[in-house]
């Protein structure tokens, strides 16, 4: 390079890169001191921030190429580095306290009136932040003009060979980072996988599907290297669980989950068998899934935690305490699913400690109805097995109402319908036949659920069995402008039926606000657990008097707080820094600052919940 401006910028970026790395080492707080974990943390630190710096450099380079004003160029270059390292400094502080990065929730708390005050920052804290910002600006100005003077005085020239070596090393570091994470994910090396969110905007590489399909590495699921507890980033449970009044007479537990089973499909003409069963059960009429998609809906059932914890749990391959308790008390496990449980990664989360022989998630049948029938018959065969056995936990996941909405021809009750459809051509004017397909699919699943209930009655084990029937999420058909799920937080996507039959509880209907997160705190006391629910869950017992102020629903990069007829949606990922949005009961956006301000105290409380089970 012979352009002094470019060489000045290169030198300035190089010094700032070292500063960023020093700041970045603060992310190592929960990195274990073993060779594998430390090497990955260091190599991913280098790879990630080198990538960001290269992007910033090319942006500045393009600006300098089109700009002829030296002062403007100098100002922009310095300002970019000041802003970048300020953000890293703030992010490090937030990550150390809350264990998540700068996101839309943080910005809303800072920018909304009353939000900054609610953080209870002292005057000394505010003064400290101002001093740091001023010092950083002065330091950056000094570094930049020193390098600029040095380059001009010493006639520094960066050779092309140096550029080639730099990009070769960068490529080597980048590939080492990405393939190391991919290998760790493939073989469940938790020292690596738990750091998928260690740095802001970090993007891990996963190749599991490719490896299984093309490299035939189907044994990857059985190998794992587990993390030492002292290095875990999780404080889950918060307190060691204590059990009293233990007895060998534990109830069986059966959870039947119907994919995309939304609240208003629990109706006499659609689900007559479930309606009949509900008359002897507890029915929760204002119940919400923990997610608007399968991943977070199922996660909230088994962990009793907000979906925000998914990545931390997945990264450490941490088993649910509910499943651990049943395993310790000698339960048999039988998991039946019409779809593979490897994606979402339930075999690495909810069922990570369940023996593979007890998981049946690859039915031989081809169509959705046939797959659902096959797993139903397998569950019934297990229930009717004559030999004496330990109490069992069974989970069945039916799939017909998902996606293409499958059902046998004889269950075409709702018409008109269509044999197939194109998702891209759907709209509110042509959706009714597709909606009828969906209702027919649920109607068929109701028939299968009826068969299971009859089997429980036939074998006389129903009275000693906890039965839960619900959905992982709902399904929208343009009632509020959305189709399907995972596209918003309207009632059609997040509100689901909740029918629970407890041997020791009288039937009834309840209108209080409830959530999937409440299932674990309801079941765990059955084993004699005397801990407060807050020690291990964000939920409360469904049979207790305590009620939620709001329901929390998770998605990939957003969460929603449903409260008093309002839905507050806010982003949770660093790459999505938009402001919160508030919707009314018809899911129409409300643009009113005073309403935004009234939710600020709840957002602060919720922010604390997001870090409560993190060290």
Image: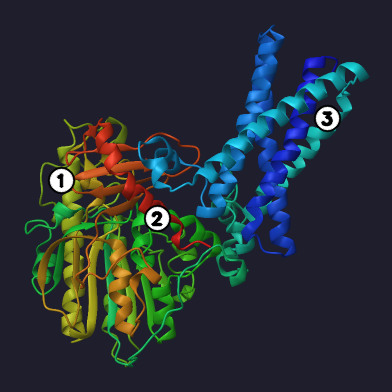
Which comes sooner in the sequence, label 3 or label 1? 3
- Neighbor class of circle 3 (other Cα within 10 Å; few <14, some 14-19, many 20+) is few
Where residue 550 sits: x, y (%)? 26, 54
Which comes sooner in the sequence, label 2 or label 1? 2
Residue at image x 44%, y 84%?
328
Q: Are marks 3 and 2 in contact (CB under 8 Å)?
A: no
- Neighbor class of circle 2 (other Cα within 10 Å; few <14, some 14-19, many 20+) is many
From the viewer's perspective, is 424 left or right of 458? right
Whole-angstrom CA distance, mark 3 to mark 2, is 44 Å
Circle 3 residue: 164
The residue furthest right is: 154
Circle 2 residue: 307
The local secondary structure at tag 3 comes to helix
Where residue 547 sits: x, y (%)? 22, 63
Dividing the picture into quarters, in which one does residue 212 lie?
bottom right
Whole-angstrom CA distance, mark 3 to mark 1, is 61 Å
In this picture the colour scheme is rainbow
Q: Is residue 139 above or below residue 497?
A: above
The local secondary structure at tag 2 comes to helix
Where residue 219 sits: x, y (%)? 59, 66
Residue 436, which numbered label? 1
Q: Are marks 2 and 1 in contact (CB under 8 Å)?
A: no
């Amino acid at each position: 390079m012979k352009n002094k401006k470019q060489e000045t910028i290169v030198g300035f970026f190089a010094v700032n890169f070292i500063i960023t790395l020093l700041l970045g080492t603060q992310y190592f707080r929960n990195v274990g001191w073993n060779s594998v974990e430390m090497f990955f943390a260091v190599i991913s630190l280098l790879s990630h921030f080198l990538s960001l710096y290269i992007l910033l450099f090319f942006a500045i380079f393009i600006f300098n190429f089109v700009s002829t004003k030296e002062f403007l160029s100098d100002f922009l270059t310095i300002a970019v580095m000041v802003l970048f390292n300020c953000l890293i400094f703030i992010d490090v502080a937030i990550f150390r306290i809350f264990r998540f990065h700068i996101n839309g929730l943080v910005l809303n708390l800072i920018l909304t009136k009353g939000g900054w005050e609610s953080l209870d920052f002292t005057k000394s804290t505010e003064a400290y932040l101002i001093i740091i910002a001023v010092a950083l600006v002065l330091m950056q100005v000094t570094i930049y003009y020193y390098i600029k003077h040095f380059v001009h005085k010493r006639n520094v020239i960066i050779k092309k060979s140096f550029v080639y070596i730099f990009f070769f090393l960068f490529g080597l570091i980048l590939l080492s980072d990405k393939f190391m994470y991919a290998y760790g994910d493939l073989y469940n090396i938790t020292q690596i996988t738990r750091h998928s969110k260690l740095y802001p905007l970090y993007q891990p590489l996963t190749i599991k599907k490719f490896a299984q399909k093309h490299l035939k590495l189907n044994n990857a699921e059985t190998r794992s290297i587990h993390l030492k507890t002292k290095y875990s980033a999780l404080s889950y449970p918060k307190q060691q669980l204590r059990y009293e009044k233990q007895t060998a007479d534990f109830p069986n537990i059966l959870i039947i989950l119907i994919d995309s089973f939304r609240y208003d499909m629990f109706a006499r003409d659609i689900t007559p068998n479930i309606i009949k069963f509900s008359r002897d059960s507890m029915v929760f009429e204002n119940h919400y899934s923990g997610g608007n998609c399968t991943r977070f809906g199922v996660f909230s059932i088994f962990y009793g935690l907000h979906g925000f914890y998914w990545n931390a749990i997945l990264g450490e391959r941490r088993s649910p305490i509910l499943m651990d308790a049943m395993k310790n008390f000698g339960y048999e496990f039988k998991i039946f699913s019409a779809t593979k449980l490897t994606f979402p990664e339930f075999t690495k989360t909810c069922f990570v400690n369940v023996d593979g022989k007890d998981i049946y998630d690859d039915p031989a049948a081809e169509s959705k109805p046939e797959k659902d029938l096959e797993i139903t018959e397998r569950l019934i065969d297990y229930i009717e097995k004559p030999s004496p056995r330990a109490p069992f936990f069974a989970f069945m996941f039916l799939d017909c109402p998902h996606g293409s909405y499958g059902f046998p021809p004889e269950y075409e009750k709702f018409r008109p319908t269509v044999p197939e459809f194109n998702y891209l051509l759907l709209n509110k004017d042509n959706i009714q036949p597709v909606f009828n397909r969906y209702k027919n699919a649920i109607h068929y699943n109701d028939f299968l659920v009826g068969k299971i209930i009859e089997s429980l009655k036939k074998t006389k084990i129903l009275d000693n069995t906890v039965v839960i029937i619900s959905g992982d999420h709902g399904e929208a058909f343009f009632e509020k402008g959305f189709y399907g799920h995972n596209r918003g937080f309207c009632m059609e996507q997040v509100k689901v039926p909740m029918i629970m039959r407890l041997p020791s509880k009288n039937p009834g209907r309840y209108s209080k606000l409830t959530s999937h997160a409440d299932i674990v705190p309801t079941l765990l006391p059955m084993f004699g657990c005397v801990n407060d629910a807050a020690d291990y869950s964000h939920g409360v017992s469904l049979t207790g008097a305590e009620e939620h102020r709001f329901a929390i629903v998770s998605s990939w990069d957003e969460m929603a707080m449903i409260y008093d007829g309002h839905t507050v949606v806010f982003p949770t990922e660093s790459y999505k820094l938009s402001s919160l949005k508030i919707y009314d009961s018809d899911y129409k956006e409300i643009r009113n600052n005073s309403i935004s301000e009234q939710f600020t105290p709840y957002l602060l409380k919720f922010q604390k919940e997001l870090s409560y089970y993190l060290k």
